[in-house]
Image (spheres, rainbow, N blue to C red):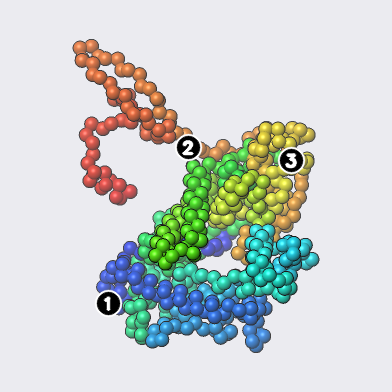
Amino acid sequence: MTVAGFTVPRQFSFTTRPYAAVDDATDTSIGLDTIDLRVRWMLNLISCAESELVSRLWHPATFDVLAAGRDGSDRKLPMQGHVAAARLGWHPSYPTGVYVPSRVTRVVTSQTVGTLRTLAYRDTAIGSLAARFDPVTGRLAPPTAAGECVPAGFTRGVVRQLRARFRRAGDASHERLRITDVQRPPRTSVMARLSAADKQLSQIAVTDAVLTLTVKLPTNPAPAGRAQWQRVRLIAAIPPHLHTRAITDWHLPTLVLDHRGLLLRCAATESVPAPDLTSGSTAVGVDWSPATLGAAAIVTERQDGLVSDYRGFTYDDRGLGIKLARLQAEGQHLHRKAARLTRLAATAPPEVRAELEGKIAVLDAHRAAVGVKRGKINRELAFHFGREVTDYATAAGATVIGVEDLTTLETRGHGRVNNNRAAQSARRKAVDALAHTAAGVGVTVVSVPARGTSALCPGCNDTLSRPGGYHRAWCPRCNVGGNRDHVAGVNLAKRALLGRSKVVHKRGKNPEIRVTAHAPVRQCRDKTSPTPSRPRHRRVRRSVPTATPQAGVNQKKIVPAPRASVWDTVKPAPASHVVTGSREVPTSPASAASVADSMRFK
């Protein structure tokens, strides 16, 4: 338990790009295109060595060692990946005649061990599911131990792999299956986590909102000696939203290359207010909705019990959800088209096959571009949602935000298209963004059980009726109800308040409340929740009245302006000017150069 008024450290991540590069030995400037090329050479060496090491270790004995967590001398394996690899004798290999510093080898082994440790859990789960799989019926037997329970989505994927394997094998062998039997070695990401090395490879310094990263880079794609690895200082700007934060430590970044060049994925540690779940009496419940990303409601604990006004807050995604649905449908269409061309290319003549492979490459490139665009929109949507809910909770004086546990949440019953669309929504990113944003103001995000939150009454805990369709909920016994998502938010906030003394903390995860408690929540006529601020757009008049001509002045022909958008937010013109349309037209139009100069420094 933490004491209110104190601060605790918290790590977060951000991205930036270098705008200048200097040779550390001669202080001469280096072009950014040259830096991108040298970074690509280093990433190619790391990626090839990592892929070779993963393929060489792709056998059951590797996962047995990682699952046991012991080396050959029965000593516990350390947490550092490069130390564990050195103790187990896992060393990468490089092309003949290529010199790679030992600190770069640390990066390779650290990333490899991290990947294999993640897959060790999948290996154990696959073995457990294969033991309960019946190849005749294609179904799983119920689990007999608590350790055999795995998420439903993971179970369905493994069952499909098992069915396909037994269909190809044509036998009903009951040997224990491993992850190496049902899938190939994974493809590793092309990146370099500099945090696995020490100051001999890279250093970081921050002064006056400028980040300087000193790192060793090769001077050619196949360095033959130590002299062909030289230090370079990369100078990058820290994002403006971090200038006022209480950052205590800056960590070494991860180097990646995208379509724009070198990208630094940095991490830092800041001081935030210490969370205190037992101090406040107000909680916010966030319900994930199939119509929008989420909705929130507030419950307050008083001396006479729990109260709520049952008027929640529905998040407005500003049309991003529709854009994501369109991009998702486009990506699925490209995937189906590429799969069809792949099937045709398998039996086509050589000249036709070459043409089809070219088309498949174009489709894959378009699909990758759609995926990148979806990722950017999901990130923007998640952090905007986190900021909106955090402001809502801060205005209400809440100290805890209860969200549905995503591990027990599964979308179904809304049709194939809607189920797929809701399953691919950015809920996990939204939870992370909400936890990050709320921690900055001292509000704690906890996970609460999701079962029954939209179907049970917060007052009497009976099943709700649906008099107005799916999106409405009503309890005739308590005479309360309203929007289905708002009622679910009340239930989530109630469970967060009642279970805050039984919070389970796990490393790397948000606090969890696993106990479902009930207490009646009565409807209070007093306004307990804040009114969320929503942008109001000035609607443009479709028609403009004819101006009265002045005496002695010839009447000019009035040309009606084109129809403007209803989302026009241009401020109305002063009364002294005569406006003939939805926008005020300046007397002397600005040149393109002046407009560009005015936008350049904003």
Q: Residues within 10 Å of mark 3 (few under 14, many from 20)?
A: many
- Callout 2: helix, strand or loop? loop
Q: CA distance from mark 3 to mark 2?
A: 32 Å
Of labels 3 and 1, earlier in sequence is 1
Q: Amino acid at mark 2?
A: Pro
Q: Residue at x 49, y 51 (%)?
A: 333
Residue at image location 48% in from the left, 50% down from the top: 330
Q: Nearer the viewer, residue 265 or 436?
A: 265
Identify residue type, mark 1: Thr
Classify residue 349 as left or right of residue 29: right
Say which of 432 and 565 sits in front.
565
Q: Estimate the x, y position of residue 373 in percent, counting from the top left.
A: 45, 53
Tally of marks: 3
Residue nearest the observer in this picture, 353 or 430: 353
**Image position, residue 513 (x, y; %):** 70, 56
What is the x, y in percent for residue 279? Answer: 66, 52
Residue at 22 percent across and 41 percent down: it is 591
Report the mark closest to the observer, 3 or 1: 3
**Image height check: is 412 above or below 68?**
above
Q: Amino acid at mark 3?
A: Cys
Name the residue carrying label 2.
Answer: 535
Q: Earlier in the sequence, mark 3 or mark 2?
A: 3
The quarter of the image holding the N terminus is bottom right
Question: In the structure shown, which secondary structural element does the residue marked by tag 3 occupy?
Answer: loop
Q: Which mark is residue 457?
A: 3
Residue 26 got which mark?
1
Quadrant in the picture for residue 44 = bottom left
Q: Of the residues under marks 2 and 1, which one precedes in the sequence?
A: 1
Q: Nearer the viewer, residue 277 or 147?
A: 147
